Image: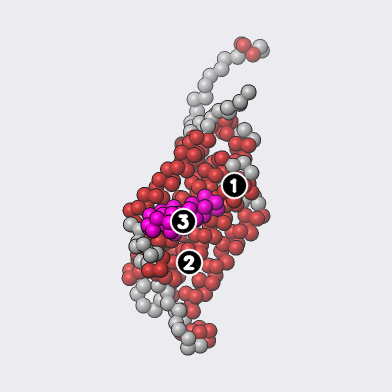
Amino acid sequence: MSVYEHTYRPYAGPLTSPRSRILVLARYGMAEAWSSKITIALFVLCLLPLLTFLVGIYIANNPLAQMAILKGSKMLAIDASYFLKILTTQSWLALILCSWVAPRLVSFDLSDNALPIVLSHPISRVGYVAGKFLALFSALSVVTWIPALLLFAFECYSSPQPWFFANLRIAFGLLAGSLIWLCFLSLLGLAISAWVKWRVVATGAIFAALFVPAGVGGVVSAVLSTKWGFLFNMPYLIATLWERLLGAENPRMIGAFGPLPTAAILLVLLLTCALFIAMLNARIRAREVVKG
């Protein structure tokens, strides 16, 4: 039968929900991220400090272990400062993991000209970014807020005194601080991946995006004798926010010019994330522009 004699009809069967389409992208994104042995090695490296913190919680709540290991020295205090160390350590290890995983998520689709094909399917640009974001966010969650809350639960179980309700703020601070940091890291990683094709350069660009403005902000604060230059220092801002969320603020972190308002810190984080979204919006397109 000739081709023109066929009767073609559009597909009228059931369609998958938009949420399921996003999960498909997230699943393939995670498979791509974990396909490297270096990713697995970095993941194991990120989990090693948790064993040290776990042993610390056990020793702090076991008198026999204190006598055998600490030998009468100062007892180990499990408080907001202790969990701040957990959050800080795991969050900066998550940065290392992000710098390796994130460059593969978007740059490969762009370099292989696969993005127009993906977006020709029933999925929007927002759904595409959401799928990639979910893949990266899930990978980083395994080394940040999930193990941190498990350690919090272990302390609640091991403590001889009622500990949960008296320290509920710590659990909230661990969760909120981790989620804010992971949203920032995920958007940063995807934005860099969308604009830089080479993996090594993209990895360096992620670190540069954090620490180069921090140096500029330090110079501005020193020259103008103002605290507002620290708004460019993202490591300082996020560390200050973590301390306030957990209730373990360290006066040495405030600096010589007085503390920064929490509202200003959140505003800078929000504006920075908006910049990353604008970068993704400018790059994620359903068409390829060829310059002749």
- Which residue is under mark 2? 86
Determine the secondary structure under disc 2: helix
184 relative to 115 in the view: left or right: left
Depicted 60 relative to depicted 43: above or below: below
Q: Quadrant of the N terminus?
A: top right
Find out whether the residues at labels 1 and 2 contact each other: C-beta distance under 8 Å.
no
Magenta segment main secondary structure = helix
- Which residue is under mark 1? 202
Earlier residue among tags 1 and 2: 2
Count the marks.
3
Q: Residue at x 55, y 28 (%)?
A: 287
Q: Nearer the viewer, residue 112 or 23?
A: 112
User: Which dot, 2 or 3, sits closer to the camera?
Assistant: 3
Mark 2 belongs to which amino acid?
Answer: Ile
Determine the secondary structure under disc 3: helix
User: Which dot, 3 or 1, sits closer to the camera?
Assistant: 3
Find out whether the residues at labels 3 and 1 contact each other: C-beta distance under 8 Å.
no
Q: Is residue 223 magenta?
A: yes
Mark 1 belongs to which amino acid?
Answer: Ala
The crowding category of the residue bearing disc 2, from other C-alpha atoms within 10 Å (few below 14, some 14 to 19, many at least 20), is many
Mark 3 belongs to which amino acid?
Answer: Val
Stretch of the chain drawn in magenta: 207-236
Q: Residue furthest front?
A: 223
Depicted 63 relative to depicted 192: above or below: below
Distance between mark 1 and mark 2 Cα atoms: 27 Å
Q: Is residue 181 visible?
A: no
- The x and y percentages for residue 193 are 57, 43
Distance between mark 2 and mark 3 Cα atoms: 30 Å
Name the mark on residue 219: 3
The image quarter in which residue 4 lies: top right
